[in-house]
Amino acid sequence: MTLNPVETPCETAIDLATFETNARRFLDAHLQPAATSTSVWGVGDDTMSPYAKRTPAQELERIERARAWKQTEFDAGFGWITGPLELGGAALTPDHARLYSEIQNAYDVPPTDIYAISLGMVAPAILQHGKRGVVDRYVEAMHRGDLIGCQLFSEPGAGSDVASLTTKATCDRDDWIISGQKVWTSGAHHADVGLLLARSNTDAPKHRGITAFAIPMSLPGIEVRPLTMMTGGTEFNEVFFDDVRLHDSFRLGPIDGGWGVAISVLMNERALGTGDAFGLGRAVERLRMTTAVQPSNARNPLVRQQLARIVCAAECIRYQALAADGRRTAGLPPGPAESVFKLANTHALRLVAELAGQMLGAAAIADTGEWGTYAWADLILTVPGLRVAGGTDEVMRNILAERVLGLPKEPSSVR
Ligand SMILES: Cc1cc2nc3c(=O)[nH]c(=O)nc-3n(C[C@H](O)[C@H](O)[C@H](O)COP(=O)(O)OP(=O)(O)OC[C@H]3O[C@@H](n4cnc5c(N)ncnc54)[C@H](O)[C@@H]3O)c2cc1C
């Protein structure tokens, strides 16, 4: 049996007003108001990017802070608001979840980006496609922040066309033997479980010969090698599988039916953009502040015009996201139209980074120690990666053109 929060009855004894009072009481008791670090120039940490360069000790400290917060939130009943009771969720409605996240915006929440893929893609896939034992082993612990998941899809020869993957899963009685290589795996160096796609049938057409698994990252034969990004951060990795033995109970979905699992994961990945997973809201706020503290820029009509354009784009995305939330509340799963959020978010972030670079000039590339200036360098260097991660701009445009607007498919030479 699998449990799906969408199918969980959402009738609840807690009305929204009582829930709001409880949420505010909880947040007041554990967090500071956001103004102390996000909306006052010169106050708090000025880091702009989750991919900023950090020492291993700083990275661990950041994860421990995120983990402690997740655990506190989960134990108080706010960690998985729409999740089923039997897995530690609160079995409340998406309206409760949305309200909580709106209230939370006013607080200084520790950065929890290490859980974005884990909770946005890996846990939902295990919940939807996993056998009971795997669901019990991972899903609640992931939502509590005890365990972290990573997405093992891309390979050196399979990115946009992920169905071309060659990592092999060979059946050996009740086990599978996994061998091959993945790449660009975000957070794999901290992950406890990976969501793996592997080729289980080389005779079938490429989309029909893939099987999905939840794979414990501590298994013998798995090697994770961090890769350094343009920012100097080491957020993603190469992952090597050398004849790794995995029991069939870790399989997600049917044998050779992994493409169906992949599609559900990719839809959830694209839907991440309906929240503020890309940090656009915070970046626009910092851009406003950066403009305001520099009188020459604040008065410059070209800067003002571009800032207005960006603020309008961010607001359009916010309203579209509310509409998408409404569709989800009505029980509709995320579809190809959600690709527009990824594209729109990264497009707006590119405009933000360009304007910040134009305004700051040398101060964005040479560290003078001045708060909120060189910090932009990390975001400027992060945006190109965001335009590639989770599907490139071109691929998003293809999806929108073909599957939403119904334009003719691009010519393909593959079967
Ligand atoms: C920061 C970051 C984090 C990532 N994290 C993960 C992760 O956690 N797990 C994971 O599995 N992967 C991850 N990835 C990999 C990511 O999903 C791939 O990089 C992406 O899908 C593109 O694949 P590729 O790099 O092989 O480029 P390619 O697919 O080789 O594309 C090269 C170029 O060709 C263009 N192109 C390709 N196909 C078409 C087409 N049909 N039409 C028009 N243009 C096309 C692309 O737009 C691109 O400009 C991450 C990548 C980044 C940058």
Image (cartoon, helix red, strand yellow):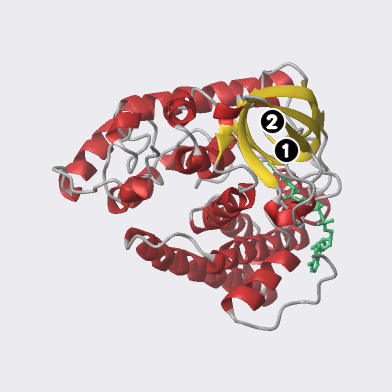
Q: In which quarter of the image is ligand 1?
A: bottom right
**Cβ of mark 1 under 8 A from ligand 1:** yes
Q: Is mark 2 on a helix, strand or loop?
A: helix
Looking at the rendered image, the quarter that the C terminus falls into is: bottom right
Cβ–Cβ below 8 Å for labels 2 and 1?
Answer: yes
Residue on which disc 1 sits: 185
Expressed as whole percent of the image width and height from the top left, the position of residue 154 reads 75, 45
Residue on which disc 2 sits: 188
At a point 61% along the width and 69% down the height, the residue shown is 307
At label 1, the amino acid type is Thr
Expressed as whole percent of the image width and height from the top left, the position of residue 99 reads 31, 50
Q: How crowded is mark 2: few (under 14 residues within 10 Å), some or many (20 or more)?
A: many
User: Camera-side residue: 317 or 296?
Assistant: 317
Query: In this rendering, is residue 162 above or below 75?
Result: below
Expressed as whole percent of the image width and height from the top left, the position of residue 134 reads 49, 28
At a point 74% along the width and 49% down the height, the residue shown is 382
Q: Is residue 74 rendered to the left or right of residue 164?
A: left
Q: How crowded is mark 1: few (under 14 residues within 10 Å), some or many (20 or more)?
A: many
Query: In this rendering, is residue 94 above or below 91?
Result: below
Q: How far apart are marks 2 and 1 (CA)?
A: 6 Å
Query: In this rendering, is residue 18 above or below 240?
Result: below
**Cβ of mark 2 under 8 A from ligand 1:** yes
Q: Is mark 1 on a helix, strand or loop?
A: strand
At label 2, the amino acid type is Ala
Q: Is residue 112 rendered to the left or right of residue 57?
A: left
User: Camera-side residue: 336 or 226?
Assistant: 336
User: Camera-side residue: 397 or 84?
Assistant: 84
Q: Is residue 383 rendered to the left or right of residue 126?
A: right
